[in-house]
Structures are given as structure tokens and as C-alpha cells.
Amino acid sequence: MNSKSIALIIVAAGSSTRMGGQIKKEYLPLHNGTVLSTVALTFLKSNQINTIAVVIPANGLESAKNALYKDPEISNFISAHNTNIFFVEGGKTRQESVYNALLKLSSKEISPEYVLIHDGARPFLSTDLVLNAISYTIQYDASVPAVNPVDTQKEIDSSGFINRHLIRRNLKAVQTPQGFKFSEIYKCHQQAKLDNTEYTDDTEIYDRYSNKKTFVFDGEADNKKITYKEDIPQNNFDTSTVKGNSMFRTGIGYDKHRLVENRKLIIGGIEIPFDKGEDGHSDGDAVLHAVTDALLGASHKGDIGSYFPDTDPKYKDAASRKLLSEVWTDIQNEGWQLENLDIVILLEKPKFIPYREQVIHSIAETLKVSDDKVFVKAKTGEKLGDVGNSNCIEVFANCLISKGK
């Protein structure tokens, strides 16, 4: 392994508006994980990266973590090579986002010798390209991969007329990762931050303030940036059931809580008058717990215990509606939507039917879907067993979710 200290910045702070606004492109499924995890894994496989800074949108930490660690190989590589990885909140522009990451990396504890800056939406690069970027950056202090443009290039004036005919053999379309000696690119970004000019990439900032040139080496035609969903090959989606232009998954959730005195009875986010309530670390809402597990199972994102461990005091008496909403946001960020949710409640007392419509509406409102996508049935225990003796509430939930191809 190279003795140089090398950091990686993955820029994934954009809103992905051209993806239709439903999901960040970096969080789309790809190979055994996501676009973001595929990017990180390619760099980790080079065995040259000491630190990774992932630049993400504000308030997007959980979604980013879920996307990065979707591929279990990520955790294996990080553990095996003791790679330091952290997340940094981005800025309003790509330039601000990179600067935020550089600022974090400049701490005495990290302060790498070299840094690679890569677009989080470029997952198709090879490990060879990463190794070339590192080698040329160490040799020349700055390097960038580039390919020859396919089309003839023209420069136009402000009125839309051709102003200059450019010579194609002298032109290159640059890609990422762009590599730099850390101390120099950090200093250049500090100066660029003060001049109120927005630069298109980091080589432009380096060229402006370092008085040095960036070495250009051969990029890869496959190293394209994802802009639209169609940019991801369809055979890279997972093997869920596919029909037409959508894939479907089902999930099953289950929960059971003792009924005890001095606790509120919360069913589907609605408090129901009764002399007993669910015993639990949170508010004990067995219905929403079962729903949460069904959705997590269908989306292959774990279970409620891994998300909200009952050993964590911050979830003591937590509102299950809030927990479900957090989970559902993460699932939606991966492009999933709810087709329907069917719930069976086993409860002797009180009678559930008078509250059914309220509960249906509460669940649908939490999931931001119409009421007709949710149905709840209730059965008694016929005075048999724990349910029949009013000692517990038991819930089964089944969901169907879908995502466009």
C-alpha cells in the first residue's frame, strides 16, 4: 500500500432535481447496494484511501448512511483497512460543498497529503482509474481524467451565433476523480471563497490560484455521470418482482405487547380510552411497530430494533408515528411508494370498530398516502389465551411497495 496519506471527498449534496425529485440519484439501487456505495467501494478496493468524507444535503445523515452501508462489503473494507469515514453537510453550490469537506479534512487529526474529489453520481469508474489518479497526482501535484469529445465543439456568442470553431483534437471532456496535493487545493479554495466567483470544477480553482498546471490523463468512456434514471443500466436493478415498468415487494410485520395499567392504549397513532395500555420502551403502539417492520422488510432495510434499539434512552416513550415517519422517509428516498397496507389486530377489549376509520386515516396521514391504501381489521381471542384474557394486543401487517424500473 502507498505510504502517502490520501483522502477522498465524495460530493453527493445535490438535490437530483432532474431525477424527478423523488429520490437522490446517489441513493438509487445499483449492484449489491446503491450508487453511493458502489462509488465508495471502488475507491476502497484500491487499498489506497485512508479517509473518506461524504458531502451530503442538510438533515440528510440517516438517508446517506443507509445508502452508503447498503452494500455489506463497505463495512468489511472499512474494518479491514481501518478507513476513517465521516459525513459533511454540503453548501448551496458544489464549490461550497467541496470547501466544507476540505475544511473538515484540514484538522490536525486528518490533514492528508493528497485528496481525490469525486462526483457521487459517477459509479462506473474502474479501480485502475483510481490508481492512475493517485499515481499522477503524487507525480504532478494535480491530475484529472479526461476523454476526447465525440461531437465537434463550437464557441457561441451571447446572441447564439458561432463565434469560434474549436479544434477537437485540442479539447478534452474532464471527469472525476480530480486529484490534488491537499495543502495546495485547500489554499486555492480558501482564496476562491473570497472572490464571489462560482467555478465549474476544482481544476479551474487550482489553475486560477496555484499558478500551476493540472496534468490530464486518459479517462474512461464508462465513467459517466448519472443525470437521469435512464443513465443506470436496467440490469443493475435488484431482482425484485418486476411487472411492466415497476418492481414490487411485499413485507410482513408482527408485534405483540402486554396490556398493563397506568399506560395509554395507542393504536395506529390514536389514543383509545381503556383502563390498560401497551407496555413498551416507546409509546407501545403495536400497530405502528408492525407496520414499520413490514415496510423495512419489504425495502430490505432491516427491522425496527436496528433502527430504534430499546436500549437507547432517547426512544423512551417516543411517539411511534414519528418513528414510522422517519423510516418511511428513508424508504421513499430510495424510490419506493406504498401500493397497499393490510393490518390485522387481535384484541379482546375495547371494541375496535368505532375507532377504525380514525386509525386508518392516522396511518395513511403518517405515510402521506390516501386512506384507500390502508385497511385495518380486528379480531378477538374468543376469551382464549393471552389475547382472549385481555392480557395483550397482537398485530400482523402486510404491505406491498413498488418502484419504477
Image: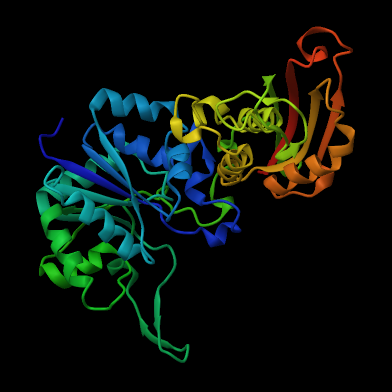
In-image side of 403 versus 67 (left or right): right
Q: Is residue 88 above or below residue 166?
A: above
Q: Is residue 144 above or below residue 279?
A: below
Q: Residue at x 43, y 55 (%)?
A: 57
User: Residue 234 versus residue 34: which sits nearer the camera?
Assistant: 34
Q: Residue at x 15, y 53 (%)?
A: 182
Q: How many marks?
A: 0
In-image side of 190 versus 334 (left or right): left
**Quadrant that contains the N terminus:** top left
Asked whether residue 173 is in view, the answer is no
Q: Residue at x 68, y 23 (%)?
A: 261
In-image side of 304 versus 123 (left or right): right
Asked whether residue 120 is in view, the answer is yes
Residue 103: x and y, percent? 21, 56
Residue 301: x and y, percent? 55, 31
Residue 388: x and y, percent? 83, 13
**Quadrant that contains the C terminus:** top right
User: Residue 173 versus residue 106: which sits nearer the camera?
Assistant: 106
User: Residue 111 versus residue 132: which sits nearer the camera?
Assistant: 111
Q: Quadrant of residue 293?
A: top right
Q: Residue furthest bottom?
A: 159
Q: Residue furthest top?
A: 385
Residue 200: x and y, percent? 33, 69
Q: Quadrant of residue 258?
A: top right
Q: How does the figure colour the protein chain or chains?
A: rainbow
User: Residue 200 versus residue 146: which sits nearer the camera?
Assistant: 200
In-image side of 185 versus 176 (left or right): left
